Image (cartoon, coloured by chain):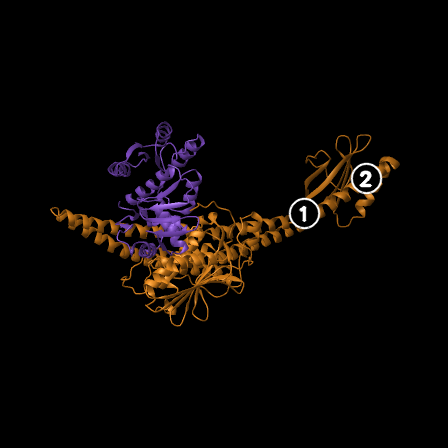
């Protein structure tokens, strides 16, 4: 039996509606058939009666009463089936000639048409037929009635009606059965999805909607739902990871802050110690604020609002500036630092964010490269696309970890012992994304090579000029390159993880920059 | 030094007023936009500190109104919005400097000093001098006690900025913004390395150190004499 839910489901209601519609159209069709058969026969009878009356009236006009009477008698004699009915009556409706025993007492309509009961001739018979007739008033006050016994017609009509009624009943039954079967099937599949949804809502995120592999609409729905669930599960896992990390990363400085303040509270007779504790406390608070600011910053960059500040940026000049800023730091640590940015390389972007991204990469390189290690920073055109590369002589990142380092607060060492927020690469990734660039980490053998690849632009040899709208349009990079179609997080054969911000068009827009 | 602070947060305002008075400034306070505009237009202030988000009248609207009426008092805009486009907007409205909350008071103080110095008018000079340290802006030569010091172009800009702000505390952020011309957040104290290199060149072989580190704030170039 169908479950009770079936009758509430919209699918079942749709099936009922479908049945009503099909029965309705069958009724219209059968009505037409009826009109075309039984109706045709009645019209045929009426036409015959009409024609006969016309003929008899004409006879009366030409030959008078005698001619009409003989013609009627002749017609009666010539009608062996006794289907025809004639009666000519006086002004007071007494029969003159005809095959009716008396003038019928049925009432005629406006055009003289009437139906009346006809009794069989002969004794003992009480069989009754229906007759259809028309009356016609002749000149001189005579009444003429011409009709037909429609017994055959009625029988045929009943037969047709019977057949049509059966047809309708069968159609309705089939439609109801088909609708119910169909809706039961649909309801069952929807119920499977509902059941899974309920289980997921109850907390089991690993549940999946069953698929039957037919590839039909429902199967596709189930497959898409499953993909969505998978994505949600991944995102939830990432959020859980991030919030765990946030909790951990913020708890440490908060604990230190609290300890420092408590110490200061106890040392109330040692102003020098109080001052020192408070200085440390402020430092801890600043660390916390820096972490929050970095998080907010990444979120705001990811929201894309910064794209309104895009202008033309020479990556080579920018790379030179980063190198100039960081080279002394590397030299102080005994590292070799080389920069190579031979030609102007202009992209559309946010100068400060790009500087921040490159600075973060260089900062990491300096942090992880041992003394005597080599760090290089370069900006060049690679296969028509501007590319910034930072290589270091550090321990590198295992291929399996390369995707994870972009997660907020992810730390390779896991111990969070090295200084840093664990947000540096997340920020680089966010900056890359709004610039439609890809960030790629490769093995430098030894060390790490970080690549920032921008969309192809037309190389501009000329020195920087003031931004004009026409030039901006010319320089606007193609929206997608061949690699730009890779979706975020796709891995290639070398295990190189690439994230891409492809498909995000860049807008060229002038921006006022504050002078030095 | 007469300062007007337009800030609606009572706690921030009372802390800032106290700190401003402690460093010897005369500080007035307005708690909403309309009062702030009236006071700024009526009083003769050396510098205005205006919060962006204010009741009754937005901070940037105050700046625009003041500028439109010909009031050119230096304005430092305070904001909790930390992005560059906000800063650009703030500077376009006529603000002279932009500081994002939360900030160290030392940062605010250093910037106020720089603003007031600028307000006093920056005459085109060809020579800067701090103690026995001299900088010729035309020949780009630096000498100390008559002895020629060779410095790199960036070090020249760094030293020029410090010399123009002689006796004032200059923060690391101010140096990044004004000498390197980038608004960004260095994860390490890269600036310190540059300053110590510069210090090695101008101070190492001389008795009196000119370039000093101010703990928790930044640097100051000062001749003690």
Indicate whether A164 appears above or below A389: above
Q: Tell me which chain the residue with mark 1 is part of.
A: A
Is the C-beta separation of discs 1 and 2 under 8 Å? no
Residue at the spot of label 1? A35
Query: Which badge, 1 or 2, comes first in the chain's sequence?
Result: 1
Residue A516 image offset from top left, x and y in percent: 42, 47
Residue holding disc 2? A54
Query: Which chain can be seen in purple?
Result: B
Q: CA distance from mark 1 to mark 2?
A: 26 Å
Residue A128 horizontal/vertical position (percent): 66, 45
Give the answer, above or below, for where A35 lies relative to B46. Answer: below
Q: Which type of secondary structure does the marked residue at label 1 adopt?
A: helix
Q: Quadrant of residue A496?
A: bottom left
Q: Is residue A436 left or right of residue B59?
A: right
Circle nearer the viewer, 1 or 2: 1
Specify whether residue A375 is in view.
yes
Residue A294 pos. (x, y %): 35, 52
> x and y percent of residue A507 in the render?
51, 50
Between A94 and B187, the one lying in front of the other is B187
**Chain coloured orange here:** A
Which residue shows up at 39% across the image and 45% down it?
B127
> Taking A218 as reference, is A21 above or below it?
above
- Front position in the image: A304 or A419: A419
């Amino acid at each position: 039996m169908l479950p009770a839910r079936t009758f509430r489901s919209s699918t079942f209601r749709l099936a009922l509606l479908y049945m009503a519609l099909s029965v309705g159209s069958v009724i219209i069709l059968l009505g037409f058939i009826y009109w075309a058969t039984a109706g045709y026969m009645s019209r045929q009878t009426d036409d015959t009666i009409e024609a006969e009356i016309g003929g008899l009236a004409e006879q009366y006009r030409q030959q008078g009463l005698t001619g009409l009477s003989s013609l009627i008698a002749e017609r009666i004699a010539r009608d062996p089936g006794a289907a025809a009915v004639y009666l000519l009556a006086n002004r007071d409706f007494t029969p003159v000639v005809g095959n009716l025993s008396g003038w019928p007492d049925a009432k005629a309509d406006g055009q003289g048409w009437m139906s009346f009961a006809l009794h069989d001739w002969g004794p003992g018979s009480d069989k009754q037929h229906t007759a259809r007739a028309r009356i016609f008033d002749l000149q001189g006050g005579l009444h003429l009635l011409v009709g037909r016994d429609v017994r055959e017609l009625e029988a045929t009509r009943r037969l047709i009606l019977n057949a049509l009624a059966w047809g309708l009943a069968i159609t309705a039954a089939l439609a109801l059965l088909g609708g119910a079967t169909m809706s039961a099937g649909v309801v069952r599949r929807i119920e499977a999805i509902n059941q899974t949804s309920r289980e997921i809502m109850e907390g089991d995120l690993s549940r999946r909607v069953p698929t039957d592999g037919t590839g039909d609409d429902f199967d596709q729905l189930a497959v898409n739902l499953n993909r969505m669930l998978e994505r949600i599960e991944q995102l939830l896992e990432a959020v859980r990871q991030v919030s765990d990390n946030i909790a951990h990363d913020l708890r440490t400085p908060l604990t230190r802050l609290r300890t420092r303040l408590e110490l200061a509270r106890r040392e109330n007779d040692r102003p020098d110690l109080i001052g020192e504790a408070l200085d440390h406390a402020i430092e801890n608070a600043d660390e916390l604020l820096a972490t929050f600011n970095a998080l907010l910053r990444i979120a705001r960059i990811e929201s894309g609002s910064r794209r309104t500040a895009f202008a033309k940026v020479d990556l080579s000049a920018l790379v030179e500036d980063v190198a100039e800023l960081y080279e002394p730091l590397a030299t102080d640590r005994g590292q070799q630092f080389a920069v190579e940015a031979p030609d102007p390389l202009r992209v559309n972007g946010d100068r400060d964010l790009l500087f921040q991204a490159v600075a973060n990469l260089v900062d990491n390189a300096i942090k992880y490269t041992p003394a005597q290690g080599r760090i290089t920073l370069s900006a060049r055109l690679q296969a028509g696309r501007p590319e910034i590369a930072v290589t270091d002589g550090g321990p590198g990142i295992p291929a399996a970890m390369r995707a994870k380092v972009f997660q907020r607060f992810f730390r390779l060492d896991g111990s969070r012992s090295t200084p840093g927020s664990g947000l540096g690469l997340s920020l680089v990734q966010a900056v890359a994304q709004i610039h439609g660039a890809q960030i790629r980490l490769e093995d430098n053998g030894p060390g790490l090579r970080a690549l920032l690849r921008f969309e192809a632009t037309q190389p501009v040899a000329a020195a920087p000029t003031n931004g004009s709208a026409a030039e901006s349009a010319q320089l606007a990079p193609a929206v997608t390159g061949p690699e730009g179609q890779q979706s975020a997080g796709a891995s290639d054969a070398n295990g190189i993880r690439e994230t891409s911000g492809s498909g995000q068009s860049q807008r060229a827009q002038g921006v006022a920059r504050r002078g030095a | 030094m007469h300062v007007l602070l337009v800030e609606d947060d009572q706690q921030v305002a009372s802390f800032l007023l106290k700190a401003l008075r402690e460093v010897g400034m005369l500080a007035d306070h307005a708690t909403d936009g309309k009062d702030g505009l009236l006071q700024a237009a009526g009083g003769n202030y050396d510098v205005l500190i205006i919060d962006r988000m204010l009741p009754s009248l937005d901070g940037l609207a105050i700046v625009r109104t003041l500028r439109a009426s010909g009031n050119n008092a230096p304005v430092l805009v305070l904001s909790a919005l930390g992005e560059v486009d906000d800063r650009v907007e703030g500077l376009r409205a006529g603000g002279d400097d932009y500081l994002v909350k939360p900030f160290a008071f030392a940062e605010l103080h250093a910037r106020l000093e720089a603003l007031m110095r600028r307000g006093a008018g920056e005459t085109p000079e060809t020579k800067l001098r701090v103690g026995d340290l001299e900088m010729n802006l035309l020949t780009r030569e630096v000498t100390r006690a008559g002895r020629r010091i060779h410095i790199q172009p960036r070090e020249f800009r760094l030293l020029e900025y410090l010399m123009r702000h002689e006796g004032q505390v200059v923060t690391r952020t101010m140096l990044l913004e004004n000498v390197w011309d980038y608004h960004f957040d260095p994860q390490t104290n890269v600036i310190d390395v540059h300053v110590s290199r510069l210090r090695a060149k101008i101070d190492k072989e001389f008795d009196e150190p000119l370039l000093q580190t101010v703990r928790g704030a930044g640097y100051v170039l000062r001749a003690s004499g």
